[in-house]
Amino acid sequence: MTAVLDAPAEVGAIPSFTVTLRVMRYLPGDDGLTPVAHWDEFQVLCHGTDRVLDALHKVKWEQDGSLTFRRSCAHGVCGSDAMRINGRNRLACKTLLKDLDPSKPITVEPIKGLPVIKDLVVDMEPFFASYREIMPFLITTGNEPTKERLQSAEQRERFDDTTKCILCAACTSSCPVFWTDGQYFGPAAIVNAHRFIFDSRDEGGAQRLEILNDKEGVWRCRTTFNCTEACPRGIEVTKAIQEVKRAMITRAF
């Protein structure tokens, strides 16, 4: 369907246009468990400043209240609204409709590689299980310090990029290895391991490297760069994975 640009009511008004949202719906089957998939199309009147999340809200609030998706902060911080938009993993709250060629239908699907619960909502437990396994917390020994653990700007810079992760699963669910092998730790778990492995205050680096040395660990990465392209925070995910591989070989971290 061609997007129709409506003339603004007055000078300076934001122009509006109609877009077609093509949403993959997953509803419980006859057994109440196995989801049955089908496409639904919705015509939505939007403005040039609207995001995909705004369009989904209009569908849910004005056309079909049964449409199900996750969202929270709506500002690219919580990471809860990661989904496949026009075949790419994105955050719905950060994707402007005008950047997607609204003259063509905009497809919206759940992220891949995780069990679908309903519509655009997936079961995140396998993702968070891998995250928990790499021990995403500071590990230290000795007596409790009497002041904060100091760190230089250079030491902080070593792992600064991987502190940006918001656990949206966009990187992990864009990985072909993860799609075909649900046991793979996935990019997000490795990124969060990187954040602590290279933290000068942490003493658990060797433990994390041993965990990631598993057959389903860091060596499963095939360096396709899908994860880096999918990250909404601009983290150099593939680079971080390579640095973890190098640390595993050299034990220098």
Image: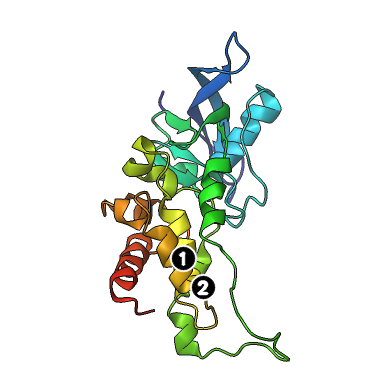
- Image coords of residue 228 (percent x, y): 36, 56
Q: Amino acid at mark 2?
A: Gly
Residue 234, can we see it?
no
Query: Would residue 190 be seen by someone viewing this image from the given angle?
Result: yes
Q: Which residue is mark 2?
A: 204
* Image spot of residue 184 (x, y percent): 40, 46
- What label sits on residue 208 in the rendered view? 1
The reply, left or right, for residue 89 in relation to residue 28 is left
Categorize mark 2 by other alpha carbons within 10 Å: few (<14), some (14-19), many (20+): many
Q: Are marks 1 and 2 in contact (CB under 8 Å)?
A: yes
Task: Determine whether 207 is above or below 151 in the image.
Answer: above
Q: Residue at x 70, y 29 (%)?
A: 61
Q: Residue furthest top?
A: 30
Is residue 236 or residue 44 the one in the foreground?
Answer: 236
**Quadrant housing residue 56:** top right
Q: Position of residue 59 (x, y in %)?
A: 62, 28
Q: Nearer the viewer, residue 108 or 32?
A: 32
Helix, strand or loop status at disc 2: loop
Q: Is residue 145 above or below residue 195?
A: below
At 42% from the left and 79% from the top, the residue drawn is 158
Q: Amino acid at mark 1?
A: Arg
Quarter of the image for the C terminus: give it. Answer: bottom left
Is 24 located above or below residue 178 in the figure? above
**Quarter in which the N terminus is drawn:** top left
Image-quadrant location for residue 231: bottom left
Please give the name of the residue rendered at 33% of the width and 60% of the height, measured from the top-left corner: 238
Label 1 crowd (10 A; few <14 / some 14-19 / many >=20): many
Disc 1/disc 2 C-alpha distance (Å): 6 Å
- Element type where label 1 sits in the image: helix
**Residue 247 position in % (x across, y down):** 33, 72
Q: How many marks?
A: 2
Q: Nearer the viewer, residue 208 or 46?
A: 208
